[in-house]
Image (spheres, grey):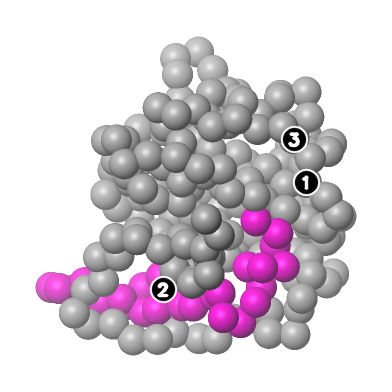
Amino acid sequence: MTETKRGGPQHIPRPPQWSLGDPAPWTDVTQIHLESLERHLAVRPTGRQLTGAPPPKRHSAVLIALYDDPETTVILTRRTQQMRSHSGEISFPGGGQDPGESLWETACREAHEEVRLDGSLIKKIGELDHLTTVSSQARIVPYVARLSHKPSLTPNPAEVDKILEVPLSELLLPEVYREERWVWPGSNEERSVYFFELFGDTIWGATANLLHQLLIAGLEDS
């Protein structure tokens, strides 16, 4: 069944004190090209950690895989309800680092395990700012990759409820993006939280933060 309403059943733990944030910084942009992203990421500093994060308890990586067919498209997953953490959430393929592997190897391995992404298609073109999640205190290294062509993907039913292949042009639509400013109880610190409302799903949290970074990175030449 085709979803006709934007937004999904994802649980949003919005605090009592919040307000709407700024409008999208890409108001006049309708497309972001993969070549533009690749040029920008090639000179972008790597290894940057967003401030204010707690010390990480574990290390993980995600793969932000992009391909042109015919426009730039990103691969996302909806996690199953049986997952121990972030169940039902929209995320990038990724997970915890295994002993003896690099975090790039972690990202590629997890993408193969979750959606059967063929490693021979993957070319690393950069990385975004590292995040540490508040809930699980996992340090996330987000690698951006270009795929040589549109892949054939199969979800791992133990982890992935659905594979989403989303054109970046959809994320740029004014009715899709929203920023909110949250203030947690007992804190005076306000922080930005980003949302992307797809048909049948809401992207928020670390995944939305990374998508926001990705789109900003692609604006320079768009």
Label 3 amino acid? Pro
Residue 46 seen in this snapshot: no
Label 1 or label 3, whichever comes before in sequence order: 1
User: Which residue range is magenta in the image?
Assistant: 166-193
Please, what secondary structure does the residue beneath circle 3 have?
loop
Q: Which residue is mark 1?
A: 67
Q: Secondary structure at mark 1?
A: strand
For marks 1 and 2 on the same chain, the one whose residue lies earlier in the sequence: 1
Q: Position of residue 199 (x, y in %)?
A: 53, 65
Furthest-left residue in this view: 186
Crowding at dot 1, Cα within 10 Å, few <14 / some 14-19 / many 20+, comes out as many
Question: Which residue appears at 25% of the width and 76% of the height?
Answer: 183
| Relative depth, front residue between 158 and 189 | 158
Question: Residue at position x 83%, y 50% from top?
Answer: 69
Q: The residue under label 2 is which amino acid type?
A: Ser
Q: Secondary structure at mark 2?
A: strand
Q: Residue furthest top?
A: 100
- Disc 1 + disc 3, Cβ < 8 Å: yes
Residue 168 lies in the magenta-colored region: yes
Location of mark 2 (residue): 192
Q: Earlier in the sequence, mark 2 or mark 3?
A: 3
Point out which mark residue 168 bears. Answer: none
Q: Is residue 163 left or right of residue 132?
A: right
Disc 2 versus disc 3: nearer the observer: 3
| Disc 1 from disc 2: Cα separation | 29 Å
Circle 3 packing at 10 Å, graded few (<14), some (14-19), many (20+), is some
Q: Which residue is disc 3 drawn over?
A: 151
Compared to residue 85, the image places residue 21 above or below, namely below
Q: CA distance from mark 2 to mark 3?
A: 34 Å
Nearer the camera: disc 1 or disc 2: 1
Marks 1 and 3: which is nearer the front? 3
Left or right? Give the position of 13 relative to 60: left
